[in-house]
Image (cartoon, grey):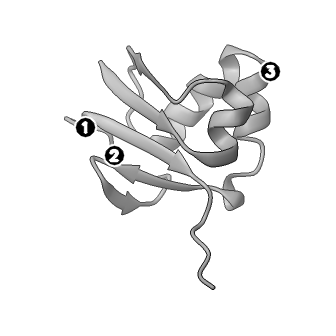
Amino acid sequence: MIDVLYFAWVRERIGLPKERIETGAATVADLVAELRAREERYEAAFADLSALRVAVDQELTDFDAPLANAREVAFFPPMTGG
């Protein structure tokens, strides 16, 4: 089981702040593919991965990062300064 957290517009599109899911995904990209296949709201949230950032166990990483032993994955838009 892995906790998946959604922030900002990702949360708005999916309609959940977080969920716990059972996954066999080896990487973050595999997890995204599983989520996108669930239903249209996930497809909309993950349509443009270049507009998303990901953290595994609270460490910023890439979509090709492995999920072995991960407890949490968070998806959020890029942070902007100003």
How far, Cα to Cα, is label 2 from label 1? 8 Å
Mark 2 belongs to which amino acid?
Answer: Pro
Residue ID for mark 2: 66
Mark 1, secondary structure of its residue: loop
Q: Depth check: give the residue in front, 30 or 53.
A: 53
Residue ID for mark 3: 40
Q: Closer to the camera: disc 2 or disc 3?
A: 3
Q: What's the residue at 38%, 21% (across, down)?
A: 24
Q: 10 above or below 65?
A: above
Q: What's the residue at 52%, 46% (across, down)?
A: 75
Please tell me which of labels 2 and 3 falls first in the chain. Answer: 3
Please tell me which of labels 1 and 3 falls first in the chain. Answer: 3
Seen from this angle, which residue lies furthest left? Answer: 69
Q: Viewed as shown, does residue 64 lie left or right of 49?
A: left
Disc 1: CA contacts within 10 A as few (<14), some (14-19) or many (>=20): few
Q: 38 above or below 75?
A: above
Q: Please state the horizontal and vertical placement of residue 80, each as a whole percent of the image.
A: 62, 75
Q: What's the residue at 69%, 61% (across, down)?
A: 50
Image quadrant where one finds the C terminus: bottom right
Per the rendering, the mark at residue 42 is none
Q: Viewed as shown, does residue 70 lie left or right of 6?
A: left
Q: Do the residues labelled 2 and 1 touch (CB within 8 Å)?
A: yes
Q: 1 above or below 49?
A: above
Q: Please state the horizontal and vertical placement of residue 57, each as a whole percent of the image.
A: 27, 47
